[in-house]
Image (spheres, helix red, strand yellow):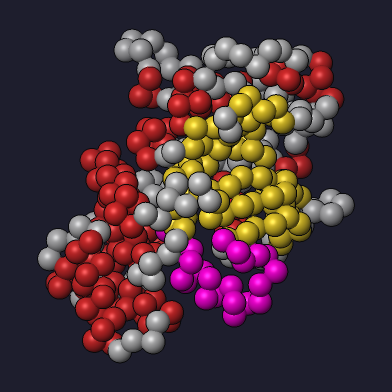
């Protein structure tokens, strides 16, 4: 399968000591054509900053310090501003984390979608309106004609999210970046949005980078999973590898603390502590301060990547120093 997106050594820094704080630190991953890759981890691990770096929308004073981002045959990080605008509209698009705040509250939602279409395509207002109606129908917005003329405050959270999805799909992107697409929605609406994304991905054949901390959504949608902790990818594998054969202690901790796997009447296991801020990252393995399996090399040396076969990779001293067979759970 051909890789649509290849990310190598991506590092994004914010002002701080020395060269700055690497919020995203040497990240590598790829997404094949028609594939869904889930980027998972707790809040503060750098998932959203990774997505914004790919789109070159990193908030100031952040900057992309190094790395490569290749979309098909184009190098994203070396593009001119105008070239990047064209790519951002036509080849990749993003659903932002908060639909409630991503829409302009004083502009009708249909006009906002129409403006997105006309920004990237030379079409008339009537053609853009017709295209907006088609998109509203495609993403399951009831009575699309009436909803075009609604203001954001007149729509539920689920409908706002569908409007954001319609806007992102308006220029038929090859890659859709969905940043926490079910956050702040109730459980029933979450399930509807997951089904919608799954159907759209299948029907359009597009690739998706799914950013989430919800492992239920990951299990429902993803083909492969990349686990992120403190700015780095610590484990990558197929959905089956990550859910059935997790090797990194952080991955196993995330799975054990998933409410969907809880035993009735028993306390849900949790990962002790919190994700450290970049100014507090430990010297060796960044998970060493929270890991129940820590031993001396973890506190001193950065773990190297161990290839476990068939695309399953893990950065952990415990995996490196043991055999590569077994599920490790």
How many numbered marks, from 0 up? 0
The residue positioned 61% from the left and 26% from the top of the image is 309
Q: Which residue lies furthest to the right in this view?
A: 18
**In the displayed structure, would residue 169 be above or below residue 260?**
below
As for residue 95 lying within the magenta part, the answer is yes
Q: Give the range drawn in magenta.
A: 72-98
Is 181 in front, or is 198?
A: 198
Position of the C terminus by quadrant: top right
Is 106 left, or right, of 254 in this rendering? Answer: left
Position above or below: 243 against 234: above
Residue lying at the far front of the rendered structure: 1
* Residue 133 x %, y %: 21, 72
Residue 107 magenta: no
Q: Nearer the viewer, residue 6 or 286?
A: 6
Where residue 103 appears, as percent x and y from the top left, is: 37, 67
Query: Which residue sits furthest left?
Result: 143
Residue 135: x, y in percent? 26, 67
In the image, taking residue 179 as reference, residue 58 lies left or right, namely right
- Work out whether 233 lies above or below 89: above
Q: Which of 97 and 206 is in front in this view?
A: 206
């Amino acid at each position: 399968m051909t890789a649509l997106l290849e990310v190598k050594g991506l590092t994004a820094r914010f002002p701080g000591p020395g060269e700055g704080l690497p919020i995203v630190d040497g990240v590598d991953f790829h997404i094949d054509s028609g594939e869904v890759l889930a980027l998972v981890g707790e809040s503060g691990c750098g998932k959203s900053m990774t997505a914004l770096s790919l789109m070159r929308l990193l908030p100031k004073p952040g900057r992309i310090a190094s790395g490569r981002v290749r979309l098909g045959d184009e190098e994203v990080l070396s593009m001119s501003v105008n070239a990047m605008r064209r790519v951002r509209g036509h080849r990749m698009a993003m659903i932002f984390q908060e639909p409630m705040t991503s829409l302009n509250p004083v502009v009708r939602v249909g006009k906002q979608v129409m403006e997105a279409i006309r920004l990237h395509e030379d079409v008339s207002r009537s053609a853009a309106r017709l295209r907006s109606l088609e998109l509203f129908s495609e993403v399951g917005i009831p009575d699309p004609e009436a909803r075009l003329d609604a203001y954001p405050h007149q729509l539920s959270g689920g409908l706002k999210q569908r409007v954001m999805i319609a806007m992102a799909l308006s220029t038929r992107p090859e890659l859709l970046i969905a940043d926490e697409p079910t956050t702040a929605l109730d459980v029933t609406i979450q399930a509807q949005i997951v089904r919608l994304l799954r159907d759209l991905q299948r029907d359009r054949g597009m690739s998706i980078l799914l950013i989430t901390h919800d492992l239920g959504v990951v299990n429902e949608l993803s083909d492969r999973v990349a686990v992120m902790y403190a700015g780095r990818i610590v484990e990558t594998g197929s959905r089956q590898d990550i859910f059935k054969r997790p090797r990194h202690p952080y991955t196993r901790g995330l799975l054990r603390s998933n409410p969907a796997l809880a035993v009735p009447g028993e306390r849900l296991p949790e990962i002790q502590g919190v994700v450290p801020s970049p100014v507090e990252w430990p010297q060796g393995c960044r998970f060493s301060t929270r890991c129940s399996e820590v031993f001396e090399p973890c506190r001193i040396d950065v773990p190297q990547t161990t290839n476990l076969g068939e695309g399953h990779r893990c950065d952990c001293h415990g995996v490196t120093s043991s055999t590569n067979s077994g599920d490790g759970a």
